[in-house]
Amino acid sequence: MNKIEHIGIAVKNLENSNELFSKLFGEPHYKIEEVESEGVNTSFFKVGENKIELLEATNEDSPIAKFINKKGEGIHHIAFDVTDIEAEIKRLKNEGFKVLNETPKRGADNKLVAFLHPKSSNGVLIELCQEIKG
Ligand code: ZN
């Protein structure tokens, strides 16, 4: 893994949270994107070299809606940048991690993504992401 790509935070209301985090960082978000397959609206902030992703559910079946119902708002996942996501999925499976997406899917921010089940990583939902080139 190369570096932390971003940290994902589950929020109830993206508009309110965009305002709140803009105040916190002193800069507005640089993009908003809906990921229909995941049932989420996302926004991204840059903080120096780091990125923060806010996620709001767009329907009740969204993983974000379920997360908030169970745990409330807060840190939802940590995403790591990888060079070859398929190789990394294979490697982590061999190491005994439970991979939620055997085949990487298209995520927000022009990335191929796959998730590891939090049960296999001390309660932390891990996202792998590989930048889609071109
Ligand atoms: Zn993410």
Image (spheres, rainbow, N blue to C red):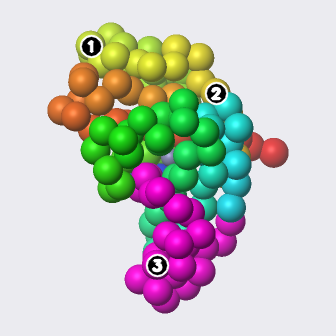
- Mark 3 or mark 1, which is nearer the start of the sequence? 3
Residue type indicated by callout 2: Lys
The residue that label 1 is drawn on is 96
- CB of mark 1 near ligand 1 (< 8 Å): no
- CB of mark 2 near ligand 1 (< 8 Å): no
Using residue 65 as the reference point, say whether residue 36 is left or right of it.
Answer: right
The residue that label 2 is drawn on is 105
In this view of the protein, which residue sits in the foreground, 90 or 15? 15
- Residue at horizontal 24%, vertical 23%? 120
- Mark 1 or mark 2, which is nearer the start of the sequence? 1
- Find out whether the residues at labels 2 and 1 contact each other: C-beta distance under 8 Å: no
Above or below: residue 101 compared with residue 58: above
- Residue at horizontal 28%, vertical 44%? 71
Residue 129, image x, y percentages? 53, 39
Residue 34 falls inside the magenta stretch = no
Above or below: residue 18 compared with residue 69: below
Helix, strand or loop at mark 1: loop
The residue that label 3 is drawn on is 20
* Quadrant housing the C terminus: top right
Helix, strand or loop at mark 3: helix
Viewer-side label of 1, 3? 3
- Mark 3 or mark 2, which is nearer the start of the sequence? 3
For disc 3, the neighbor class at 10 Å (few under 14, some 14 to 19, many from 20) is: few
Residue 26 falls inside the magenta stretch = yes
Q: Magenta segment, which residues?
A: 8-31
In this view of the protein, which residue sits in the foreground, 69 or 118? 69
Using residue 41 as the reference point, say whether residue 22 is left or right of it.
Answer: left
- Residue at horizontal 34%, vertical 16%? 98
- CB of mark 3 near ligand 1 (< 8 Å): no
